[in-house]
Amino acid sequence: MLPVAGIVVTGPPGAAPDAAPVAQGVRPVADAVADDESSQDCDQEGGYAVTGLPEALDRYDVSRVWTRATGRGVRVAVVDSGINVANPHFVNGGPYGDAYAEGTSFLPASLEQEYVNVYEPHGWADPSGHGTAVAGIIGARPAEGSGVVGLAPYATIVPVQVFGAVEDPTEQDPELLPDTGRLADGIRWAADAGVQVIAVSMSVAEPDPRLEDAVAYAGSRGALVVASAGSALTAPAGDPGGVHYPAGFPGVLGVAPVGSDGRPSEQTFTGSHVDVAAPGQLVATAYRGLLDCYLSEEPTPSYAVPYVAATAALLAEQFPDEGPDLWAHRIMMSAERPRQGSRDDVLGWGAVSPHDALTLTIDASRPGPPVPGHPPAQTGTDVVGPAVAGPRSEPWAPARRTGLLLAAGGVGLVAAVALARALGRGRRDATD
């Protein structure tokens, strides 16, 4: 499912709502919401560190997940605002391999003369911070003093910059805003670059042939496109809601967010384009060129998309010959829901479960989403309830008060130790 005219892209993490360069008319939108003013503390010189493993990774039991796959050898395109490679979570070389590769920018090169740190020909600049946050959820490496790490910590991010932003919110240069044609070009470029997964945390209200062709082309090149379901919190005036794109196009995995309590957001656009759900509120991830931050006071699709994209990267490593359709099937079939054959327009097939996706046995007779090339075995009409179990305690309380957790020293202790232990145990057979 894909964005069309009216693509939405919100402004920098932590920006005031009026600072977001929300496109009007027929432009795509990045579906992230601004945070409260407390998250501005993340901008302090030297940055702040989230010292514990991100709550979503704890719920996913990544120690088990990483014994099977870590995203090694998989390239994930983040079609967004670029990535800030100055962030300590993006380091090339070393035991985790390259965190990022040479990407591209579809912004005019002339912007390099007008703005500082906006345009970079390889996509290695991120004036809004949005793309960096998305990339961090997918493939952040352990960093000194931080517990943040990506769900696919060995995956390589390929940045494809299709929009930008400027520090001064009064500047609204049209060349920096999301553009449907640019988005379509970015998806095509990513497919030609040989990526296996394309993360698009953007949406638009109407289908556009350029986008539809781009996602179809990506699928033909072996790439799975994962896209935002869209949100009323970031939609431009006049957005009708309902099915948004590219999530609504065939072959695209559409993602809705759930809050830290596991419940869906009433602001997310519902419809047939919603395939699965993932965490999207108070997400701990890489922040600008500094370090970490908890982002999004409200559940937002922008930060749910990368959890699903990272799951796809894990599958691409473990099942490289299956291809995008079967990777998507694994994600949908293994999602947590009240009954196997049930789906609804709020959470799709339910909450993503990376470990279950990695261990799923493909069976065309099982109720649920049909196996590609096979008719549906059975459908259900149950309403999917809260897809993610509620928090075991109140892990987000400190984040709500401060917007971050302070560094406590160490070398990415929680994340690095968890990853090392998981890898040290080696992979188990897919039957256990």
Image (cartoon, grey):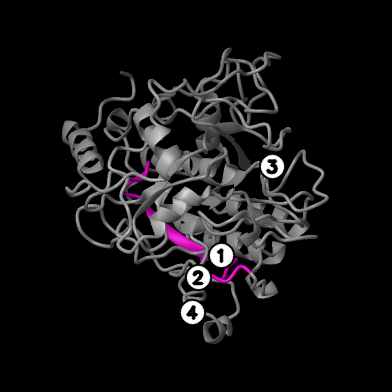
Q: Nearer the viewer, residue 290 or 250?
A: 290
Mark 4 belongs to which amino acid? Answer: Val
Which disc number belongs to residue 189? 1
- Answer above or below: position of 124 versus 12: below
N-term-proximal mark, 3 vs 4: 4
Q: Disc 1 to disc 3, how far (Cα)?
A: 19 Å
Mark 1 belongs to which amino acid? Answer: Trp
Residue depth check, mark 3 versus mark 4: number of the one nearer the observer: 4
Which disc number belongs to residue 250? 3
Local crowd at mark 3 within 10 Å, few (<14), some, or many (≥20)? some
Magenta residue span? 149-169
Residue at 58% across / 56% down in the picture?
Answer: 16
Split into 4 quadrants, where in the image is the C terminus? top left
Split into 4 quadrants, where in the image is the N terminus? top right
The answer to whether any part of residue 151 appears in the image is yes
Q: Disc 4 to disc 1, how far (Cα)?
A: 25 Å
Q: Is residue 161 magenta?
A: yes
Q: Which residue is mark 4?
A: 116
Q: Secondary structure at mark 3?
A: loop
Question: In this rendering, would 225 be left or right of 42?
Answer: right
